[in-house]
Image (cartoon, coloured by chain):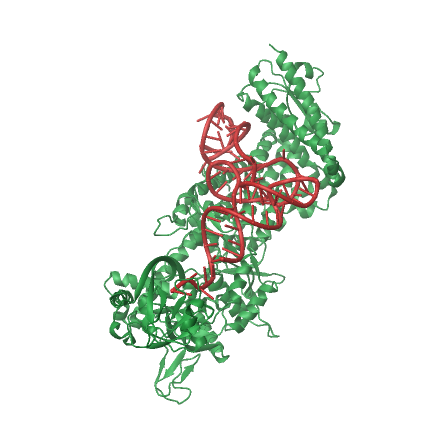
RNA sequence: UGGUGUGUAGCUCAGCGGGAGAGCAUCCCCUUGACACGGGGAAGGUCGUAGGUUCAAUCCCUAUCACACCAACCA
């Protein structure tokens, strides 16, 4: 039994009331569960979520990416794909470890004090808490994730995948351990990725220092921003062509503040214009100097230790912190008269992204992945189009990095992460790398083996996400069904960190039988960055962070989702303001009320054609299509148009296009025009009422379907409120496996019918709207209240149109509030003053006497007259150019000629109207 | 230094070869039986600047300015 209307839907859209309940309902009904194997004839669709870090709460960027992914997922699911959107979280090594350390510090505890095992227990507890919080947030947003498949980058299965990959790469000779220069975070006490070092502009001082020639009075001036490293200099360098220093070629120099002698080397790398043109070379503490040193065979001399303090090699400065050593060196140089001058400059200093402290280039023993062999096929996959990027220009960014890619340092001196599966032998120093924890050294058999203390870079494991989450290295059904995944949706800021690594790993480990690598996905969609309303990056320090949950709380998840979708087409930045979200809340409310309108109408009906979704209505409309009124045919035509537009947008990752099409259709076409049209036949009863009610029902259902991927909550709530006859089979939009978008495509049925094309309902309604708009415009301009009624004179130019307009007469009267329509009165030109003109088939007159202030109307008509004259002039001008007639397409010339004729008539009529009006007293 | 992107109505953005559109904000009218989170109307733009191509340019090309981001070896 249906409930009374009042109970079916509340007074207005109140998302809080139903959103949370609906998600539980979907969960209970297992709407988002993917099957391990496709049904016969079914295809799969899969997106793996970019796993959020377990460090904290979700921000607006997460809201955006998950909204987009959910829209794509729900759309495919509704089309009948076996759809999997796989959830999970990332352990995020450095980020999480430092968060937990911070927390411990507040409690007066420390990592070291706890020891590795106890510390890791703390982190796991943290992880559990945050992962479940993240899950709640994603659910609040409406994300249709298959939670039964939730993964974590350090869960048991995934750890096995990581170990497998490490061992395989090691066995294949693609992982090695060696002493190389890497970026080191003194604060975090670990190696960090080059990508985690952000070159940041800083005010620095450039010190000019004298380096004396050995056994002579001559010297060379060297400019440096890091004087403390001079203790580790092993050469000075000048440009070979630099005339100033040619006399010094072959000489040796004394390192200031020490007794060491170093050579002068010549290298074109040196920029003659900078500083003094002389460069000090410190191969142990600078990337460029390191390369220079390698090239010229210079020794390494480490004067700064991993602890950030000067080493014993720094002599008198040993034990000092870097900054302390720097000022002491400057002091000593000054005392010895070796400091020539000090310059203020702005240069870029590498800052560790995580700690905000200066990253130090250091020589250190680390694990590396030999990248060349992995990178090559990854480049090819994008070159050949096996993987596409949207927007396409990101391809270039990808290539640029991939062509210049360097070996990947994968070890980190952290505790939180995948500990490297390598064991060092105490006796013979051999390294044993194994999948299963070994009992003895693989070389000498000694039982004195100890596992490497380092953990792997987080991105090493994230790189395996598309197949590790599906059960690899086991040969699972899920892997077979869902790998390769369909789309990767993420931010452009992690193209290098993550996207490139996944492509490399996927191609290397997932192979076809012929050995060809299978890329982890074929489409990469990179969304824009969400900024605040001023276009600034949201950050905690700026305090401009908009919390998605706060917005959801206020305006509903749907409002936020639709806002984000509608703005997602933008290239790089999305400026989000709270106002926009409120606008879309209004949209949801509009939709809500449109459905409520249907309920008011339906309630009076005894039974109806809605046994199943779209079933009854659709059949009725197909069978009776040619008998439908113009208005009903028209809205079906517009629905079809909107459907095509929405699909195009979804296919091409233009969600803004889809959402705009939906917005325009729902609000302007369905609500503003169609429902207004529908009121009349619905009131009249009889046959007109029935077909209109059915059309309205069908269009509303279809609209809910189209909107569902974007605003799942409100559409589901409204869907469930529709008058289903068999309550126990009420379908949910979220699970319904019917290819919903397909069936609502009237196109399939009507496209074959010539009648559809030739009916011209679009043209008829265009004309009808034109008449109504003209009268409204007349009222508006003259401030005429709707209560004031007046007759409308129409001159119809075609017999066919006259017949149609007579059918539509009541609509015109209702919507214009005119008292009556008088056709083709011979008195028109005498009695009425022309008010306006519609497009082509109708001329429209209104008697001004007693309605309008003469001055106002004079102003109005003058305005119109001027505009028409200008337009006419423009067209005439265009048509008078011989080149235009000769070279422009004939269709266009014909169109312009017609326009000229129309405008000429208009100008004439308006001129007459003006003259007449002026004569009036 | 190089690369990429952006510059269109007061604001946020669509459009991208035939004389510009939306939403919000503004102004005016309307509490009409879905909706005031509403309805109707109006006003508002030499489409960053300068050249070029074309019958035709907001849209293509070149240069230039401004802003943003990315990649970088200037100590």
x and y percentages locating residue A276 in the rendered image: 39, 64
The answer to whether residue A349 of the structure is visible from this angle is yes
Name above or below for residue A211 compared with residue A61: below
Give the residue drawn at x 27%, y 76%: A312
Quick one: quadrant of the C terminus of chain A? top right
Q: Nearer the viewer, residue A844 or A105?
A: A105
Q: Is residue A630 left or right of residue A274?
A: right
x and y percentages locating residue A871 in the rendered image: 65, 29
**Residue at the outermost bottom position:** A444
Quarter of the view holding residue A125: bottom left
Q: Which chain is red?
A: B
Give the residue drawn at x 38%, y 49%: A545
Q: Nearer the viewer, residue A641 or A702?
A: A641
Please state the total of marks drawn on the protein image.
0
Q: Nearer the viewer, residue A680 or A604?
A: A680
**Residue at the outermost top position:** A921
The answer to whether residue A24 of the structure is visible from this angle is no
Quarter of the view holding residue A243: bottom left
Q: Colour of chain A?
A: green
x and y percentages locating residue A832 in the rendered image: 65, 16
x and y percentages locating residue A239 in the rendered image: 45, 69
Q: Is residue A85 left or right of residue A549?
A: right
Quarter of the view holding residue A920: top right
Name above or below for residue A879 compared with residue A109: above
């Amino acid at each position: 039994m249906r409930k009374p209307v009042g109970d079916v839907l509340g007074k207005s859209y109140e998302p809080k009331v139903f959103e949370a309940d609906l998600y539980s309902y979907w969960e209970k009904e297992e709407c988002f569960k993917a099957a391990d194997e496709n049904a016969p004839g079914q295809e799969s669709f899969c997106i793996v979520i970019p796993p959020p870090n377990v460090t904290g709460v979700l921000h607006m960027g997460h809201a955006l990416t998950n909204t987009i992914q959910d829209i794509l997922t729900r759309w495919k699911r509704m089309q009948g794909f076996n759809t999997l959107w796989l959830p999970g979280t990332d352990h995020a090594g450095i980020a999480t470890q430092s968060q937990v350390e911070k927390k411990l510090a507040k409690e007066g505890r420390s990592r070291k004090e706890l020891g590795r095992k106890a510390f890791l227990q703390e982190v796991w507890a943290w992880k559990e808490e945050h992962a479940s919080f993240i899950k709640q947030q994603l659910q609040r947003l409406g994300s249709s994730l298959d939670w039964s498949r939730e993964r974590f980058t350090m869960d048991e299965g995934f750890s096995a995948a990581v170990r497998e990959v490490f061992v395989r790469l090691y066995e294949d000779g693609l992982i090695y351990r060696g002493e190389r220069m890497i970026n080191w975070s003194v604060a975090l006490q670990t190696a960090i990725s080059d990508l985690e070092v952000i070159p940041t502009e800083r005010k620095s001082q450039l010190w000019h220092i004298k380096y004396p020639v050995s056994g002579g009075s001559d010297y060379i001036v060297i400019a440096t921003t890091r004087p403390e490293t001079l203790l580790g200099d092993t050469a000075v360098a000048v440009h070979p062509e630099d005339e100033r220093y040619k006399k010094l070629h072959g000489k040796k120099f004394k390192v200031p503040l020490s007794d060491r002698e170093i050579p002068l080397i010549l290298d074109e790398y040196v920029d003659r214009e900078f500083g003094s043109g002389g460069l000090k070379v410190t191969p142990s503490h600078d990337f460029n100097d390191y390369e220079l040193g390698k090239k010229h065979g210079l020794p390494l001399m480490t004067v700064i230790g991993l602890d950030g303090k000067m080493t014993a090699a720094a002599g008198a400065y040993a034990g000092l912190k870097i900054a302390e050593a720097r000022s002491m060196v400057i002091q000593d140089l000054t005392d010895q008269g070796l400091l020539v001058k000090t310059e203020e400059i702005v240069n870029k200093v590498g800052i560790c992204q995580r700690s905000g402290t200066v990253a130090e280039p250091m020589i250190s023993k680390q694990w590396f992945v030999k990248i060349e062999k992995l990178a090559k096929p990854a480049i090819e996959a994008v070159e050949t189009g096996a993987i596409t990027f949207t927007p396409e220009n990101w391809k270039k960014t990808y290539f640029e990095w991939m062509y210049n890619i360097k070996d990947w340092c994968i070890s980190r001196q952290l505790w939180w992460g995948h500990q490297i599966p390598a064991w060092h032998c105490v006796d013979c120093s051999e390294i044993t790398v194994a999948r299963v924890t070994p009992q003895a050294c693989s070389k000498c058999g000694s039982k004195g083996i100890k596992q490497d203390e380092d953990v792997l870079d987080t991105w090493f494991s994230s790189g395996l996400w598309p197949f590790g989450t599906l059960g690899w290295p086991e040969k699972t059904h899920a892997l077979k069904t869902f790998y390769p995944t369909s789309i990767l949706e993420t931010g452009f800021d992690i193209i290098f960190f993550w996207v490139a690594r996944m492509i490399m790993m996927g191609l290397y480990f997932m192979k076809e039988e012929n050995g060809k690598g299978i890329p982890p996905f074929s489409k990469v969609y990179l969304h824009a960055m969400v900024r605040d309303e001023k276009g600034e990056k949201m950050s905690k320090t700026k305090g401009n962070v908009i919390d998605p949950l706060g917005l959801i709380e206020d305006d509903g998840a749907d409002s936020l989702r639709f806002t984000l979708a509608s703005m997602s087409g933008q290239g790089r930045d999305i400026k989000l303001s709270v106002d926009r979200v409120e606008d879309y809340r209004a949209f949801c409310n509009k939709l809500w009320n449109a459905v409520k309108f249907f309920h008011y109408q339906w309630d009076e009906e005894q039974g109806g054609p809605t046994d199943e979704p779209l079933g009854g209505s659709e059949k009725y409309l197909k069978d009776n299509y040619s008998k439908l009124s113009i208005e009903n045919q028209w809205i079906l035509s517009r629905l079809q148009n909107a459907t095509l537009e929405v699909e195009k947008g979804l296919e091409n990752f233009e969600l803004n296009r889809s959402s705009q099409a939906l917005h325009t259709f729902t609000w302007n076409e369905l609500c503003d025009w169609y429902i207004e049209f529908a009121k009349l036949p619905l009131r009249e009863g009889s046959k007109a009422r029935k077909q209109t009610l059915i059309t309205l029902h069908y269009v509303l259902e279809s609209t809910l379907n189209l909107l569902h991927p974007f605003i799942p909550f409100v559409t589901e709530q409204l869907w469930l409120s529709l008058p289903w006859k068999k309550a126990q089979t009420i379908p949910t939009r979220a699970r319904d496996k019917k290819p919903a978008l397909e069936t609502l495509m009237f196109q399939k049925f009507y496209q074959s019918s010539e009648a559809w094309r030739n009916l011209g309902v679009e043209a008829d309604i265009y004309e009808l709207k034109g008449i109504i708009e003209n009268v409204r415009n007349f009222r508006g301009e003259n401030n005429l209240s709707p209560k004031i009624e007046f007759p409308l004179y129409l001159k119809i130019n075609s017999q066919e149109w006259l017949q149609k307009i007579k059918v539509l007469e009541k609509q015109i009267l209702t919507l214009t509030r005119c008292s009556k329509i008088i056709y083709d009165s011979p008195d028109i030109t005498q009695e009425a003053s022309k008010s306006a003109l519609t497009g082509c088939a109708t001329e429209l007159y209104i008697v001004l006497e007693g309605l309008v202030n003469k001055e106002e109307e004079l102003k109005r008509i003058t305005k119109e007259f001027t505009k028409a004259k200008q337009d006419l002039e423009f067209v005439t001008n265009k048509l008078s150019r011989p080149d235009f007639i000769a070279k422009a397409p004939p269709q266009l010339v014909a169109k312009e000629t017609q326009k000229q004729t129309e405008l000429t008539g208009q100008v004439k009529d308006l001129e007459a109207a003006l003259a007449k009006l002026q004569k009036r007293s």
